[in-house]
Image (spheres, rainbow, N blue to C red):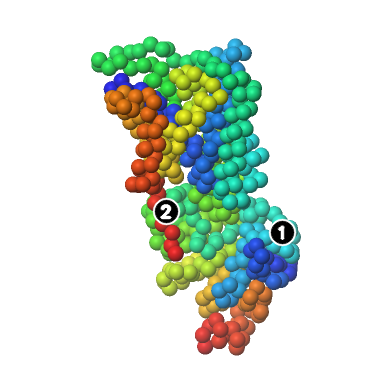
Amino acid sequence: MALLELRDVQARYGPIRALHGVSLTVDEGEVVALLGANGAGKTTTLRSVSNMVRTNGEIVFDGRRLARRSPEFVARQGIAHVPEGRGLFPELSVWENLRMGVRGRLADSEAEQVIESFPWIERRREQHAATLSGGEQQMLALARALVSKPRLLMLDEPSLGLAPTVVRELFAIVRRLNEEEGLTVLVVEQNATIALGLATRAYVLEVGKVAVEGTSDELERHEAVRKSYLGY
Amino acid sequence: MQQVVSGLAQGSIYASLALALVLIYRATDVLNFAQGEMATFTTYVAWSLMDHGLSFWPAFAATLVVAFIGGAAVERVLIRPVEHRPEIVIVIVTIGLLIALNGLTGWIWGPEVKAFDSPFPLRTIDVGGVIISLQDLGVLAVCLVTVALLWAFFRFTTLGLVMRAVANSQDSSRLLGVRVGWMLALGWGLAAVLGAVAGMMAAPALTLDPNLMLVVLIYSFAAAVLGGIDSPIGAVVGGLVLGVVINLLGTYVDFVGGELRLPAALTVLLLVLLIRPQGLFGHRVVTRV
């Protein structure tokens, strides 16, 4: 059974329809990528799952319907959403941002795990999040999502505006967590090459609909996907 | 020096109410024009409790509880239904609440002035040749202790951390599972507590009537703008500075006297808005276009 399932989800911002009936599944333990051009509906799909946008259709997580529940309810079901722009609290310190992942005090074991994956956090723990570099902010957003021990991690454009080395490091951490701890990931990404390298399956969205879907290998061989998103 | 201490005492009242304004502004981006009337209403509650035989401090504590519940209730009942409307709608709701509370206060307790006992001795002490009123020292101490307790709450407790996060970004907080609505209600409750402290400290000196906090609210707006409307520390510093400056101007500048203190505060407000709109400690808003 799918951990997350969207059935014919439509979403709108006021009078503008952003999704025209998106259906997709994410199985437990897999990494699924959402690809597409600007305005295709990738971010809106994640926002629909988190109920940050008005939707119709069915969204089911672990057998429980999420439609029309509050974003805080969705988060409490074990869905960690790292939004585009990272969603950090710029006036809080690095450590306080991390603590918001558990809405309390970090246990010693949790703190050790974070510092193992992101050693620089220990040195910067009292620094305001706003003063971090873009890469560090993205890492912190990921770390904060991970301390909540999510069942599903949703990443929205994690590579946006980051140096290639930082992107590689970020995706390596996500891959390790998926392989070693079975973390389920739904990632929205414009960089199709890096997304397909991480994901087992992917969906290509065009104007608010799923245009193509398949395994990463299949999509890498798909002529239209290659030309439009992989550049060869 | 005596005028400075007296100014600090008055300023601590402005600081408390200014901090209440800033707390709500940071969380919701709107100014609560009813903050002063909420404070007046709760001060009347304290007066009623004392009128029924309670001494000052038990009445003070009970009033803070009433203020907290009332403030949270205002958020849930009046502000929540319009929270997604344009800011001007929320501002109009707070102005409506100001008028309604002012009328309700007069209707319940009458328009006549009431004496409000001070918890502090009315005598003075001589400190190195400077005559200082114990009333002023007491007011200053109560307001500063309240502000310090609030600071400790925000700095050292998980609830305080979550409330600061909500003030930073409601959307990000929701995505982390924070019940933002309850945090906003809590913020309104705490702001009402600060207002109640300001009201109960101001009433003995100003005497209690339904317009008790109208003028104090204007001073507090000026203090909040002076310190930086989004800065809690700015509200406190702004309140204290304004209290001292206004008191010194009223005492030593002949033409200011007692009558021109309010225009002097408004002049400060205007100058700050013209010269340094973000105030002493506020953040300058830069928008990328």
Q: Amino acid at mark 1?
A: Ala
Q: Residues within 10 Å of mark 1 (few under 14, many from 20)?
A: many
The residue that appears at 55% across and 72% down in the rendered structure is A189
**Apparent side of residue A176 relative to residue A57 in the rendered image (left or right):** left
Name the mark on residue B193.
none
Residue type, numbered disc 2: Val
Badge 2 density bin: few <14, some 14–19, many ≥20, Cα 10 Å? few
Q: Residue at x 62, y 45 (%)?
A: B181
The spot of residue B182 in percent (x, y) is: 61, 42
Instruction: Where is residue A78? Give x, y as percent.
Output: 63, 56
Q: Residue at x 37, y 29 (%)?
A: B260
Residue at 37% of width from left, 24% of height from top?
B258
Q: Where does residue A163 sit, x and y in percent of width and height?
A: 41, 71
Front residue of B71 and B106: B106
Q: Nearer the viewer, residue B187 or B24?
A: B24
For residue A67, which numbered disc appears in the image?
1
Residue B285 numbered tag:
2
Most foreground residue, A161 or B22: B22
